[in-house]
Image (cartoon, grey):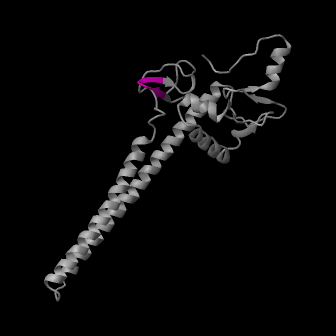
Amino acid sequence: MWCPHCRQHAPIVYRGVFAHCAACNKPRPPFSATALNLAGKPSKIGGTVGKVVGYGVIAAGLLAALTLILLFYFLAPTSAMGLAVGIPLAIISLAVGIALIYGSSRLHRAGTDAEREARQQALYALAANRGGMLTALDAARALNLSVAEVDAVLSDWVKNDSDHVSLEVDENGELFYLFSTPGQRLDTFGKRYRVEPEGRVRVLDALEGEEATGVEPTRSRHRS
């Protein structure tokens, strides 16, 4: 899974038929890592299909059981044959349907977890490649996801791991996410940041220092 270009443990993103590193966007061989676009999708689809089949089994089984009970009742009102056939059929249908629904729910949940894990891995690698700072817009463009999908993953990440990911605000009120390196805690004291129009985040103190010394500011931390 390691990218030979940026050395990040990053998934790959398919754009058309070509695979690219989720961190540095350089070309990578297909199937060389987890595909961000496909992570968890088969399990989620299988879970949805299984759940539909489970409800279908319950509905069809109960309908068939009721039909048999009524049929035997009209043919032989005093006979208990309808109940003897219909009740076991209904019980079997319920048991099979509930088992399918339960198993499908677990499969769908496993797919959701795999999808979230792949997205977190891609976001962390992307942040590491861009100085530990990301906006939802910048990440969405880089990973070929919607801003809402990226923001949902990052917001949940902040809630569950605030020591290593935090939501920050630059001097203009723009929101961005700040990541720490492994084994370190976040430390933003004394630093100012600016979110550029394209969604990149810069350390404003460093930017102003470059301008003051006559050095042309770097437009982005992204490696080409």
Where 141 falls versus 70 (above or below)?
Answer: above
Kindly indicate the quadrant of the structure image that contains residue 76.
bottom left
Look at the image and tell me in which quarter the C terminus lies: top right
Where 194 falls versus 161 (above or below)?
Answer: above
Q: Position of residue 151 (x, y in %)?
A: 62, 41
142 sits left or right of 106 in the view: right
Q: Position of residue 125 (x, y in %)?
A: 59, 29
Q: Which residues are magenta?
A: 13-19
Kindly indicate the quadrant of the structure image that contains residue 176.
top right
Please give the name of the residue rendered at 49% of the width and 33% of the height, measured from the top-left corner: 36
Q: Residue furthest left?
A: 75
In the depicted view, which residue is nearer to us: 131 or 220? Answer: 220
Q: Is residue 84 visible?
A: no
Please give the name of the residue rendered at 29% of the width and 62% of the height, measured from the top-left corner: 57
Please give the name of the residue rendered at 70% of the width and 44% of the height, measured from the top-left corner: 162
Q: Position of residue 122 (x, y in %)?
A: 56, 32
In the depicted view, which residue is nearer to us: 14 or 113? Answer: 14
40 sits left or right of 95 in the view: right
Circle count = 0
Q: Position of residue 196 (x, y in %)?
A: 72, 26
Kindly indicate the quadrant of the structure image that contains residue 143.
top right
Please name the predominant secondary structure of the magenta segment in the image: strand
In the depicted view, which residue is nearer to us: 65 or 24? Answer: 65
Please give the name of the residue rendered at 22% of the width and 80% of the height, measured from the top-left corner: 83
Q: Is residue 117 visible?
A: yes
71 sits left or right of 144 in the view: left
Where 24 falls versus 42 (above or below)?
Answer: above
Q: Would residue 208 be counted in the magenta stretch?
A: no
